[in-house]
Image (spheres, grey):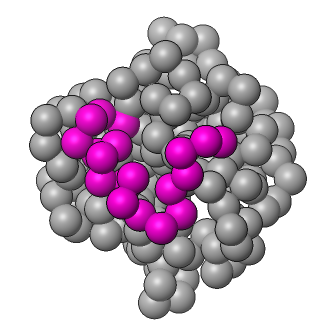
Amino acid sequence: IPVSTGEDDCPRIISRSGWGARPSKHVEYMKIPVEYAIIHHTVTPKCNSMAECVEKVSSIHSFHVNTNGWDDIGFSFLVGGDGNVYEGRGWHQVGAHTYGFNKKSVGIALIGEFSDSLPPRVQLDALKRLLKCGVKEGELAEHYKLLGGRQISATKSPGLALYQEIQTWPDWVENP
């Protein structure tokens, strides 16, 4: 399975081919570095092994393409309870995760539902490492703004518990 471990700061990223993604129907590229990282949750059952997480990511991909009619999975990355990061549209492609912000942000979804409980530590750590890696590699602006999906759209994402957690992180901002 193709993976990227990059520098020590970067989490293990499972490539699109590593989880069996179909090619995107259309690709639009973003101007890098992006100014925003927007956190979501998938509102699906959690996954704790790579096999479970691959199944969840594939299922979300199918839903976004077949049911929503999108060109590809909406998220830039998805973070599993196994501690792996799964490449969606990646750092460079415009996603379909937060209306009005897709061309200037990465949308990162944690697999699970986090209204009442936090993701496991390994999942939060992978998210933090992905953000740090994005800055280090010039994909995210050095002083990027971290947001929860609920700050921009009429949604409860990323769930109250996870939203309260990211509000304590140094790059979170109250106003986009």
Position of 37 compared to 126: left or right? Answer: right
Q: Is residue 169 magenta?
A: yes
Q: Is residue 16 above or below residue 133?
A: above
Q: Residue at (36%, 24%) from the top-left corner?
A: 156
Q: Is residue 174 above or below residue 44?
A: below
> What is the quadrant of the C terminus in the image?
top right
User: Residue at horizontal 43%, vertical 20%?
Assistant: 155
Q: What span is colored magenta in the figure?
A: 158-176
The image shows residue 17 at horizontal and vertical percentages of 52, 53
Residue extending furthest toward the bottom:
8
x then y, percent, for residue 105: 68, 46
**Residue lying at 60% horizontally and 12% vertically, measured from the top left:** 69
Q: Residue at x 53, y 74 (%)?
A: 132
Quadrant holding the N terminus: bottom left
In the picture as drawn, the residue positioned furthest to the front comes out as: 174
Please state the horizontal and vertical placement of residue 135, each as a whole percent of the image. Answer: 64, 73
Tally of numbered tags: 0
Give the quadrant of residue 101. top right
In the picture provided, is 93 more to the left or to the right than 164? right
In this rendering, position of residue 8 left or right of residue 153:
left
**Magenta segment, prevailing SS (helix, strand or loop):** loop
Q: Is residue 60 above or below residue 87?
A: above
Q: Is residue 87 visible?
A: no
Residue 78 counted in the magenta span: no
Q: Quadrant of residue 85?
A: bottom left
